[in-house]
Amino acid sequence: MSRFLAAALTVVAAAALAVGAAFAVVALLNATPDQPNVPLISYESATPRR
């Protein structure tokens, strides 16, 4: 009976660890990084040169 109890506790602990890791990954993916509001392309004037 003690081996069955140890196996059951191991399964429960592994499931809890997997659920915690899944929540951590989702939380990291939802985190938005700080991005500067600087355009990559800028034009000096609105009229094109010919």
Image: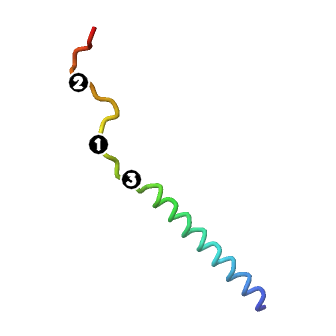
* Mark 2 vs mark 1: in front: 2
Residue type at tag 2: Glu
Q: Amino acid at mark 1?
A: Asn
Few, some or many residues within 10 Å of mark 3 (<14, 14–19, 20+): few
Calculate the distance from the C-alpha at mark 2 to the C-alpha at mark 1. Answer: 18 Å
Way the structure is coloured: rainbow
Under tag 1, what secondary structure? loop
Residue that carries the numbered disc 1 in the rendered image: 37
**Of the numbered discs in the image, which one, if any, rests on residue 44?**
2
Between discs 2 and 1, the one toward the N terminus: 1
As helix, strand or loop, the secondary structure at mark 2 comes to loop
Along the line of sight, the residue nearer the viewer: 43 or 11:
43
| Rendered view: 35 above or below 48 | below
For residue 18, above or below residue 45: below
Q: Is residue 41 above or below residue 50?
A: below
- Residue at far bottom of view: 2
- At 34% from the left and 34% from the top, the residue drawn is 40
Kind of residue at badge 3: Pro
- The foreground one among 7 and 27 is 27
Left or right, 15 with respect to 5, comes to left
Residue 4, image quadrant? bottom right
Which residue is most to the top? 50
Relative to 46, is 1 on the left or the right?
A: right
Measure how far apart labels 2 and 3 are at the Cα level: 29 Å
Q: Secondary structure at mark 3?
A: loop
Q: Name the residue tied to disc 3.
A: 33
